[in-house]
Image (cartoon, helix red, strand yellow):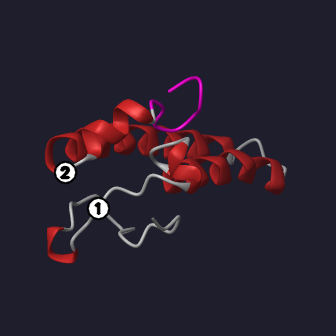
C-alpha cells in the first residue's frame, strides 16, 4: 500500500471513476482525515505567525467549517466507499488521536 493519498480532491466525493481504495498506512493509520488535520493546524498557527488577535476570528470559523466538513465526509465515506467501515473500526479517530 502507498502512504500517498492519490484521491485527494477539492471537494468530498467517492471517485469510482478512478478506482478509489482506502489508504491505511502512514498517517492514515492514526487519523482518518490527515489533510483536514493539516489545514486545521495551519489555521490554528496562523494567528500566532501573524501576531494578530483579529486573525483568530476567521481562523476559528475555518477550523469549525473543516470539523463540520470532516464529519459529513466521514459519513459519506462510511456509506459509499468499500472497505471504509472496516478501516473506521481500526482507525477510530477522525482528526485528533485519543479525542475525535
> Is 56 placed above or below 16 here?
above
Say which of 39 and 18 sits in front.
Answer: 18
Name the residue located 29 percent from the left edge and 61 percent from the top edge.
Answer: 21
Residue lying at the far top in this picture: please name it: 99
Asked if marks 1 and 2 touch (Cβ < 8 Å), the reply is yes
Percent position of residue 75, x then y = 24, 38
The mark found on residue 82 in the picture is: 2
Left or right: 37 in relation to 83: right
Q: Is residue 79 visible?
A: yes
Q: Residue 79: name its quadrant.
A: top left
Name the residue located 19 percent from the left edge and 51 percent from the top edge.
Answer: 82
Q: Which residue carries the number 1 mark?
A: 21
**CA–CA distance between discs 1 and 2?**
7 Å
For label 2, the crowd category at 10 Å Cα-Cα, with few meaning under 14, some 14 to 19 and many 20 or more, is: few
Residue lying at the far bottom in this picture: please name it: 18
Percent position of residue 30, x then y = 56, 41
Name the residue located 56 percent from the left edge and 23 percent from the top edge.
Answer: 99
Q: In which quadrant of the rendered image does the N terminus lie?
A: bottom left
For label 1, the crowd category at 10 Å Cα-Cα, with few meaning under 14, some 14 to 19 and many 20 or more, is: some
| Residue 63 part of the magenta-drawn span | no
> Is 17 placed above or below 34 here?
below
**Mark closer to the chain start, 1 or 2:** 1
What residue span does the magenta drawing correspond to? 92-100
* Element carrying mark 1: loop
Left or right: 43 in relation to 49: left
> Is 19 placed above or below 32 here?
below
Left or right: 48 in relation to 75: right
Left or right: 81 in relation to 21: left
Percent position of residue 20, x then y = 26, 66
Amino acid at each position: 500500500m502507498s502512504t500517498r493519498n492519490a484521491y485527494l480532491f477539492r471537494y468530498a466525493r467517492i471517485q469510482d471513476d478512478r478506482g478509489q481504495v482506502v489508504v491505511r498506512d502512514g498517517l492514515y493509520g492514526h487519523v482518518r482525515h490527515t489533510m483536514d488535520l493539516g489545514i486545521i493546524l495551519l489555521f490554528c498557527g496562523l494567528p500566532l505567525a501573524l501576531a494578530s488577535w483579529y486573525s483568530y476570528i476567521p481562523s476559528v470559523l475555518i477550523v469549525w467549517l473543516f470539523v463540520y466538513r470532516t464529519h459529513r465526509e466521514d459519513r459519506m465515506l462510511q456509506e459509499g466507499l468499500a472497505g471504509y467501515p472496516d478501516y473506521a473500526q481500526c482507525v477510530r479517530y477522525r482528526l485528533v488521536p485519543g479525542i475525535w
